[in-house]
Amino acid sequence: MAWIENTKCECGHQNRVGTVLCESCGKPLEDIGDSKGLLEMRYDGVARRSQRVNPNFIDRIWNFFSSVKVAVYLIIFTLVGAMLGTIFEQESNFINFDPTTFYKNKYGQIGEIYYKLGLSHTYESWWFVLLLVMIGASLVICSLDRVLPLYKALSKQRIPKHMQFLTRQKVVYQGLVAEKGSEWVERAVKPLRKKGYRVHTEKAALLAEKQRFSRWGPYIIHIGLIIFLLAVLFRGLPGLHYDQHYWFPEGEETKIPGTDLYLKNEKFTVEYYSEDEMSEEFRKTGKVVPKLFETQAVLYECTANCDDPSKEPLLKEVKRHAIQVNDPLTYKGLRVYQFDFDLTPKLRSVQPVLVDKVTGEQYGKFKLEMNNPQQEFKLGPYTLELKNKFLDFSLNEQGQPISKSRDPNAPAFLFIVKGPDLPEEGSQFIYFPKQIDKERFQQDAINEKLGGLQNKLELDVQSMEDIDIIASSSYLNIRIDRAMPFVWLGLGIVMLGLIMSFYWQHRRVWLRIDEGILTLGAHTTKNWFGMRREVSSFLSTMGIEADEKSLENGGE
C-alpha cells in the first residue's frame, strides 16, 4: 500500500506512480513544504508507462525504446553507418562490374577489406535495415509513451489549481482586487477572448488556453518520420522499387526484367560539339564531347505468351518517346532515363554451320543469338545442347571461365554435342563466334582439354551475310519507385509538424481569487517574453499595472 500513500494528493485524487503534478489540482507531489522552485511542466507532470514500478519483460523492452537517449544513440549509429557507405562506391551504382575484384584492383587492400566487410552494399545490409527498424520502433514507442498521457492530461484540465501550482510557474502575479472574485473573473473573460484564448471559468477561478494544437507538433513530426522510414524500408519489397541499368541494342525489342514490358531501341543518334562551340579548355584536351544523345524508344506491353519461352510474345505498343538526358520515358510509374551509349559494333547473332572435318560434310545453318539463344539445335545426326553462355568471356584467378559483363564483347558458348561416335552423355565443345577471340583464348586448345572435338567437328560462319551486327547501343536506367510518393508524404508531414512546433506556442493562464487576493500563473512552451507581455497587457486591461519584468517567477 506504500505506493498508494506516496501518490495520493491532499485533494483526495489517487495518482499513478511517476506522476509529478497531481492530475486533479496540480499540486507538486515530489516536494514537501512551500518550495519556490519552478515546476517541471513537461507532459504536464503526468505518469508514463516507462515509469512503471517492477516492470515485466515487455515493460523493459518498452522502457528501452521509449528512452530519448537510446533514440539518439540509434540515430548516431545509423549516421556513422551511412557515412561508411560513402567512403567508396556502392555496388548499386554500377552497370557491369565484378565487385569481387573491382575494389581490390582500384583501392588495394583497403578496398578488399571494405568489400569483405559488406560495406559495398551498406544500405541494403541487414544491420543497416535493422537500425532503421529500431529507430522506427523508438519513434512509435516514444510517441505513445508521452502523447497518450499528455492528451489525457490536457483534455481533462481542472480549472481551480493548487496554490503551489500557480506560484511556481515562471510567470506569476499576486495582488489585491477590490471586486468580488466571481465578478472579476467574469469581467476577465472578454479581454482574454480578444487575445485568442478559449476561456473556462468556475466560480472565482479561470483557465484560459490557446494554440494547444502546437503541443502535437513533435508527434506529428514522429508520424512523418515513421511514414518516411516505412517507405524507405518497403522500397526493398518486390515491385515497389526498381533501379537498374540495361543495355538496349538498336533494332531490338528487349524485355525489361521483372515486368511484362518490352522496350525497343528503334534508333540511336548522337551529336557532338564542334570545335567552335567548345571552350578553349576542352579544345586543348582533344576530347570529343557529346552535345546530344537520344534513343528513339517504343514501349510495348505483353498481352499474351508472356512467360512461355516456346512462343513469340504478343506485344501491344503503349508509348513512344525520344529519350534524352533528363527527359525520360514515363509510363505508369516506370521511368526510363538515358544513361550512356556505346557506338562499338557488337554481334547480335551469327548463323554458323556444323562441319564434319573428316568427311567435309556440313550440317545447318542455324541462328545463334547472343542474348537469348535457343537451348538446343538439331543438326543432321548431331544435337547441340547449350550448357553455358559467356557474353564477355574471361578467366578468373582460379582459371575458371566467367563473364566480365552483360555486353557481347567476347561471346563464347559451351555446348554438349551428342551424335555418332561420341559418348552417350556427349562431349563438351566451346565456340567463339569472333575469329579474334578464337585466337586470343585458343579455342582449339580449350576443346582439346574438353574432349578433343576440334579434330572431328567445328562451327564455322560461311560469309559476312551470316553475321548480324548491332551498330549502336543505349545504356538506359530503368526506375520504378512506387514508394517515393510515401517518402514525400512523410517529409511533408514532418514539415507540417515543424511549422506547428516553431510558429505557434501553447499558452495557458490560470488564476484564482481567494478573499480578495488574485493569484495568477501562466505557462508557455516557448517565447516567455511574449507570454509576460501578454499577461501584463491583460492585467492592464483589467486595471492592474504590472511591469513585465516583475512577473518573472513572482518577482517584485
Image (cartoon, rainbow, N blue to C red):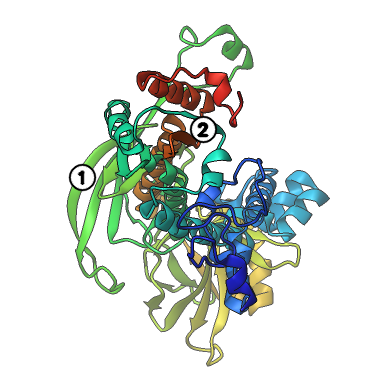
Residue 337 position within the rendered picture, expressed as x and y whole percent measured from the top left: 38, 40
Work out whether residue 389 or residue 553 is closer to the camera in this orientation and state it: 553
Residue 415 placement (x, y as % from top left): 51, 74
Q: Is residue 260 left or right of residue 427?
A: left
| Furthest-right residue in this view | 109
Question: Considering the image in quadrants, where does the N terminus appear?
Answer: bottom right
Q: Is residue 244 left or right of residue 98?
A: left
Circle 2 Cα neighbour tier, 10 Å, few/some/many (<14 / 14–19 / ≥20) = some
Disc 1 residue type?
Lys
Q: Secondary structure at mark 1?
A: strand
| 262, above or below 50, in the image | above
Q: Residue at 64% across / 66% down in the picture?
A: 401
Report which residue position mark 2 lands on.
526
| Residue 318 visible to an observer of this rendering | yes
Q: Is residue 465 visible?
A: no
Quarter location, residue 198: top left
Callout 2: helix, strand or loop?
loop
Label 1 to label 2: alpha-carbon separation: 56 Å
Q: How many marks can you see?
A: 2
Q: Mark 1 highlights which residue?
A: 319
**What's the residue at 49%, 39% (across, down)?**
344
- Identity, as a three-letter code, of the amino acid under mark 2: Lys
Residue 101 at x, y percent in the picture: 71, 55
Residue 41 placement, left or right of 82: left
Residue beneath the point at 62% across and 67% down: 6
**In which quadrant will I find the C terminus?**
top right
Q: Nearer the viewer, residue 230 or 527?
A: 527
Tell which circle, 1 or 2, labels the residue nearer the N-terminal end: 1
Left or right, 322 with reference to 484: left
Front residue (pair 190, 491): 190
Q: Where residue 145 appears, x then y in whole percent?
A: 51, 61
540 shown above or below 56: above
